[in-house]
Every structure is written in C-alpha cells, then in structure tokens.
Amino acid sequence: MFRDATSQQNQPTLQAFISLLTLVEALATITEQRENAQCVEAGNVPTITLGAAGQAFAEIAKQVLQCCYVGVLAIDPPDERQRLIGSSGLPPDEEQRLHEDTFQVPLVDYVDDAAIAELHTDQVVLLDLQKRPFVTARSIHGARFRLVAPVMLHGKLIGLFTMAKTDEKYADVHNAYSPEEIALAKGIARLAAQVIEKVGLLQECAEAQAKEQRLQATTRRYEDFISTASHELRTPLTTIKGNVQLAQRRLQALERQAAQGLHPVEGLRRIEQPLKETLLNFNRLERMILELLDFSRIQADKFIMRKQPCNLVEIVRHTVAEARSSVDERSIRLRLPTMAVVPIIADADRISEVVNNYISNAHKYSPLEEPIDVRLSVEGERARVEVQDRGPGISPQNQVHIWERFYRVPGIEMLGERAVNSNLGLGLYLCKEIIELHQGQFGVSSAPGQGSIFWFTLELAKVSDRSGNTPA
C-alpha cells in the first residue's frame, strides 16, 4: 500500500512531525553551543542553567506551535511546588506576574486531584479556566483554554509543559486542540525532560570539574607550602648548627690560650657573634613553629582567645618599640591619638602579633631607606590601626588571595638580608583569623608601585566592658 503523505488529509500529522524535528534540531544546536562554552570556561559552573535552557526551550517551542503562550515549569518534591523555568508569548509585566504567581506554589492549588492523577500517569490534561474547579485560576494573556503535558523522567513527574490558546475561535477545550497538537505537546514534553536531565548532568559534571580543579589547586599550594616550610625550617637549623660548631672551636682555642697563661679577652668577643646569630635564628625558628602550631589549632577549631579589657595605645606602642629594637636600621614612625587610652576587649598578645606581622611584612618588602608609618586612630565606635610601607605594592588580583593560607604574592621578593626571614605564607592568614575572632575588620589598600597600607579595626569597649562586668 502507498499513501501520499502530502495529501490534504495527512497535512496536520506531517506538520506536527516537521515541527518536532525542527525543535529537536534547534535544541541540539543550543546544547552544542552551551557545551562548547563550558569547555572554554573549564572549571566554572556551566553557562547553561536550568532557567537558561528552559527559556530557550520555551522560545523554540513557541515558534513551532500555533498558540499565544508556551511555558515550562519544574515540579519540586516533596509537595510538588511549581517553579517557572521558561516562558514565551507574554509581555514582560505579565511574565513577571506569572513568575510570582507560580513560584513555590503547590500544584494542587492550580488543578484538582483528578487532573494531578492524570498527569502522574503521563496523560495530557486540557483545562477550561472558566469552568470549575479552575475558575480561580488566572488566565494567561486572555487565554481561556490551556493544555498541560506532563514532563516525565524515569517514571516520575518532574515538570509541566503548558500551551495556551485564546477562546475566540473555539466552543470548548476539546475543540481547541487537535489530536496532532496533543501528540506534538506530548513529544515536546518528552524533549523537555531530556533537556532538564542533560542540564542537570552538565551541571554535575561542571561542579565535579570545578571541585577537582579547586582540589588540585589546594594540593599544589599545600605541596608548595611543604617545600617552602622544609626549606625555611632547615635554613635556621643549619645556621644554628654552624654557629654552635664555630663557638665550640673558638672555645677550644680559648682553652688552649688559658693553658698557656694568656688572657683570652679578644677570643671571648669572637664567641659573642656566633652566639648572637644562634639566638636570632632560634627566635626565627621558634616563630615559624608557633605559626604552624596556630595554624593547626585553627584547623582543629582549638584556637583560643584570652580576651580581657586592655589599652590599644599601649599594645601598639609596645609592639612598635620591639620592632624598632630588632630593626634599628629602619625608621618606624608612630602616630597615636590624643587620648591616652583606647579601650578594647581583646587578647593583647594576639593583637600585638597582628601589628608585628604588618610591620614585619613592611620591613621585608620595602627599601631600607624608606620609613614605615604606624597609625592608630579612633573612628566613631571603632579603633583603626594602619601600617604603611613604600614597597612594590600589590595588584588587585593578588589582594584577593593574600589572606589565604600558604599564599605568597608571585614576583615580589624580600630585599637584601631580610630575605632570610621566614615566609611560610601563613602570616596574613593568621592575622585574618585573629581579627575575625575579635569581630573586627581587616584589609589592604595598595596599587603596584605605590606601596601598601595594611589595616584592621576593632570595636571600642563599652562602659560595662571597661569595668569588667560584661564578659568578653
């Protein structure tokens, strides 16, 4: 038998088939473009989202269907709340209203139990919004007759595909939609299920890739940290060992001089230098070990603050005095407020550690002839501490990362003899944790070639805090 598919009788079926093929081809093009964009942006969440895919799907479906409106909704478990993910054919104000009307509204508020049961059995539901129980439903752009096709995935209702027609030409809902249109709507709903599933898989794949890249970046940074920490810890140990051996040899020489009846005054002076170097390197080693211990305590959530009423003026003044004594070749200028007391509730040792770290970084990375400025001021209910250097500055891209653990700004090296100072990439990370545990704020103002200002703010102690009646 032969049938003429182009005959007038078979035109609706042929047109529906062609429309479905057009929709399939268009969707294939969209997903290919989205996947290519995802490959370009590897490691990021894909540019295609469920909303973007749903909107593209609705616009294409509207083009192949003879109707005034098309919508795609997701159904969220467990109580089947609706979520519009794409629509086409509405003015912007009505589309916004539809989003608001349907967002997280249970399906049972729109259709009766019998219609919901039909949807769960993969049947198309035809609705006349002027008949019960749908008289309370709001019409869409003057459309009275609505077709609702279930979007099924693995036997479960995950969404709805809806199309609407005006009521000018049709006596009832059954005349509004032909069998070909109903079949086409069911086919489009099945395509919608495939789109939703594919978008979900793409998102899972992209999130897994992004997670893997973050893990790889963290692993690389951790490996760099281990390498740096090994080197930094080995350097002072080697220096300490060498100076101790040198001091031992000089002591043996002194013993020989004493046995010969000589006065070993000059020899004693020669022992002083290696012992001084030993002490400096021991302090450096101790500081790095304390950083590692603090880091491990933070990771284990055992980093304890011993807060009590204290004077920030004295903390800053004492820290600057210690810094001046350790780097007497550097000019460190201090500016304090006129008030003698700036009261805070804090762990004084930890706040001093932050100020010292800021000063130490300024000393490491700025020319020796340039001064370091330390300023303490009071702004309203908060105290602000700033440390300014005239170093190379930090780019905006690196400013985002300098507070991260193990991070060291690439391309910026410590100057001269200061390069022997430790830099495990933990200093600013610990500063951040300390200030956050004090409910303070921190940051940096910098630009390449213009130096940096590292700062933090702390809330001033209230009257009850200062008297010690309110616990920290």
Image (cartoon, rainbow, N blue to C red):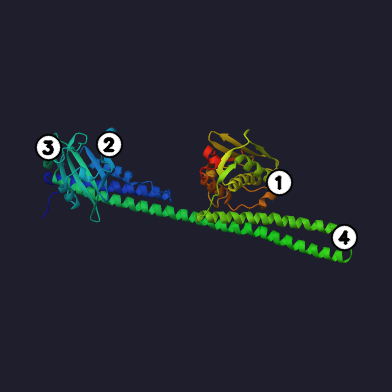
- Judge left or right: residue 85 versus residue 409: left
Between 238 and 149, the residue placed more toward the observer is 238
The residue depicted at 59 percent of the width and 35 percent of the height is 377
> Eyeballing the image, is 245 above or below 165?
below
- Judge left or right: residue 371 versus residue 21: right
- Residue that badge 4 annotates: 263
Type of residue at label 1?
Ser
- Residue that badge 1 annotates: 325
Q: Secondary structure at mark 3?
A: loop
Percent coordinates x, y for residue 326 in the rendering: 70, 48
- Residue that badge 3 annotates: 170
* Gap between marks 1 and 2 measured at Cα: 70 Å
> Eyeballing the image, is 376 above or below 262?
above
* Gap between marks 3 and 4 measured at Cα: 123 Å
Tag nearer the camera, 3 or 4 = 4
> Which of pointers 4 and 2 lies earlier in the amino acid sequence?
2
* Gap between marks 4 and 1 measured at Cα: 33 Å
Q: How dense is the environment of label 2, judged by Cα within 10 Å: few (below 14), some, or many (20 and up)?
A: some
Type of residue at label 4?
His
Type of residue at label 3?
Tyr
Percent coordinates x, y for residue 470 in the rendering: 51, 43
Type of residue at label 2?
Glu
User: Decide: marks 4, 1 in contact (CB < 8 A)?
Assistant: no
Tag nearer the camera, 4 or 2 = 4
Percent coordinates x, y for residue 49 in the rendering: 35, 46
Residue 95 numbered mark, or none: 2
